[in-house]
Image (cartoon, grey):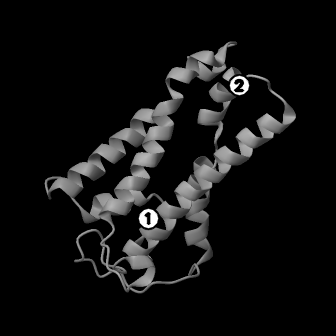
Amino acid sequence: WPLSSQEDISSLKRFCPLGCAAAVFITCVVLICSRWRFGEVLGVEVCGGPFGNLDAGGLHFWPTSFMSVAASLPLLAFALNSSWAYIPILCTLHNKTERRVTGLIASSNALIFANYILISVYGHVMFCEHTAPNILDSLGAAAPPGSGPIATLIMVARGALALQL
């Protein structure tokens, strides 16, 4: 019995902050796991993984195969689906003029786009050729459970992602 199938979806207001918080938290985890080195590309160590011990090949600024792009498209479509926070916010928006609704849509999509640009750029620079379509998969493979606070942070991020779904 999904919450979104109800006639009155205002009850989603209680749950939509989980999705927003999880998205921002995952971005923070990717940025924390990046090995910051000034003077490098984007200020981070290239192709070394979160611990600097990964030989992830070279940094490519263009996809090497159509299949690598196709593998990321379902996740990208899910990532840019802003309805998880948009519908409950729209239900409580006062004075729903066309300008306010358009502003809500444009600003929320701009924030979501900026969030995923950070994840994709820093995730790709960290793992280069070995970047999985879901960056948490790459991080989890590079930091197995029990390998310190970074591994714990990654496990919490995976839990946050699962919880908000």
Direction top: furthest residue: 7
Q: Residues within 10 Å of mark 2 (few under 14, many from 20)?
A: few
The residue labelled by disc 2 is: 93
Residue in the picture at 60% in, 34% down: 85
How far, Cα to Cα, is label 1 from label 2? 38 Å
Label ID, residue 132: 1
Secondary structure, mark 2, is: loop
Most foreground residue, 58 or 109: 109
Residue in the picture at 43% in, 75% down: 125
- What amino acid type is highlighted by mark number 2? Leu
Direction front: furthest residue: 95
Q: Is residue 71 above or below residue 4?
A: below
| Residue 65 shown left or right of residue 137 in the figure | right
Direction right: furthest residue: 98
| Residue 142 shown left or right of residue 137 in the figure | left
Q: The N terminus is located in which quarter? A: top right
Q: Residues within 10 Å of mark 1 (few under 14, many from 20)?
A: some
Question: Where is residue 141 drawn, in percent x and y?
Answer: 29, 62
Tell us which disc is closer to us: 1 or 2. 2
- What amino acid type is highlighted by mark number 1? Ala
Question: Where is residue 15 drawn, in percent x and y?
Answer: 50, 25
Contact check, label 1 and label 2, Cβ < 8 Å: no
Most foreground residue, 146 or 87: 87
Label ID, residue 71: none
Q: Quadrant of residue 28?
A: bottom left
Q: Of the residues under marks 1 and 2, which one precedes in the sequence?
A: 2
Most foreground residue, 97 or 123: 97
- Could you tell me how many numbered marks the image carries? 2
Secondary structure, mark 1, is: loop
Question: Where is residue 92 drawn, in percent x and y?
Answer: 67, 21
Question: Where is residue 83 drawn, in percent x and y?
Answer: 65, 36
